[in-house]
Amino acid sequence: MTKSIVCAFFIIFILGMMVNEIEGQKQGCNEVLKEVDCGAGSCSALCLQKRKGLGRCVTPKGNDTLKCYCYYPCV
């Protein structure tokens, strides 16, 4: 009986931690880094340095030029 209670508590605890992790992933921020062009990894390097995030070069709809978007966790 005690083993099953401890096991159930442990499972509920682990599931609660997983839900918190998933909820944290939903809240992400982004910004366009205008001070860099998209070439030779400069977008991802600046994003990592500036926001500790992930930089990606993206072509926005209706625009032919690449823009550097920095995706980072909101604090």
Image: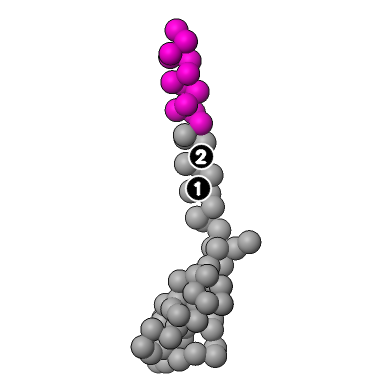
Q: Nearer the viewer, residue 63 or 51?
A: 51
- Say left or right for 51 vs 40: right
Q: How many angstroms separate mark 1 from mark 2 (CA)?
A: 6 Å
Residue identified by numbered label 2:
17
- Residue 43, picture quadrant: bottom left
Q: Nearer the viewer, residue 25 or 64?
A: 25
Q: Residue at x 45, y 28 (%)?
A: 11
Residue identified by numbered label 1:
21
* x then y, percent, for residue 59: 41, 84
Where are the magenta residues, as a range?
1-13
Residue at the far right in the pictured view: 75
Q: Quadrant of the N terminus?
A: top left
Magenta stretch mostly in which secondary structure? helix
* x then y, percent, for residue 10: 47, 26
Query: Which numbered circle lies on residue 8?
Result: none
> Which secondary structure lies at badge 2?
helix
| Above-or-below relation of 31 to 10 | below
